[in-house]
Amino acid sequence: MIKWLFFIFALNLTYAATRVPEGLAADIQTGLDFETLNPIHPHLVFNDPDKAQAWLRDMSHRLDKWIKDDYLKTGYLTIIQYEAARANLDPQIVLSIITVESRFNNFVISSAGAVGLMQIMPFWQFWAGTPEHNLFNVQTNLRYGCSILRYYLQKENGNMEQALARYNGSIGKNWYPELVMQAYYNYWRPYPVVTMKNNQLVTIDYTK
């Protein structure tokens, strides 16, 4: 059922070719080293369990375009939301990056050698001092990707467009941020959902 994820190594020729190494800030290096080696079990981070379940159901339905297996979808989405929240990122942006980078194939490798869901270049392992990490591991890959994007946001004073351009290695150009935002508006833009609770239709806005 999900055999393709484990046996097919696809070749992504598009987005990682221009990426170059940059030194990480000390706090990011420490976080990648300690927290990836000692990860907390991922869980949905919401202040209301109804919002958590509404988000999960909504995103799972949207993820059907790329993944059909319900167990795999729940696992991916839980890790994505957890790692995004941990890095103080919008999970919808992280989902959009993954859509552009890998189409949710965790075993994709680009022509430049970028790996996994968020297309992490292996040089980040050496900058972080953690060459033993497995970038094909979903949580490890997302930990790197979210930490790197958070670092670039700090470096760009919160400017997401510029941070995304740095993430791709296309500083000063806007084509990559535009691709990510196109994925955001086409697939991942959040909306309140209508669901049943106590035999009544209720609207849950998981974005607040």
Image (cartoon, helix red, strand yellow):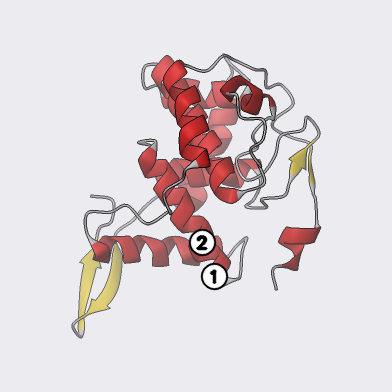
Amino acid type indicated by mark 1? Tyr
Q: Residue at x 79, y 49 (%)?
A: 10
Give the vertical position of 19 relative to 50 (above or below): above
Residue at image position (33%, 65%) is 54
**Disc 2 target residue:** 75
Quadrant of the rendering where the N terminus is positioned: bottom right
Residue 157 vs 104, above or below: the answer is: above
Query: Under tag 2, what secondary structure?
Result: helix
Q: With respect to residue 109, does 68 lie above or below?
A: below
Q: How far across and down, in percent of the image, does residue 115 sit?
A: 70, 39
Q: Secondary structure at mark 1?
A: helix
Number of marks: 2
Q: Find the distance from the CA under tag 2 to the CA under tag 1.
A: 6 Å
Which residue does the numbered mark 1 point to in the structure image?
Answer: 71
Whether residue 161 is visible: no
Question: Contact, CB < 8 Å: mark 2 with mark 1?
Answer: yes
| Left or right, 137 with reference to 183 | right
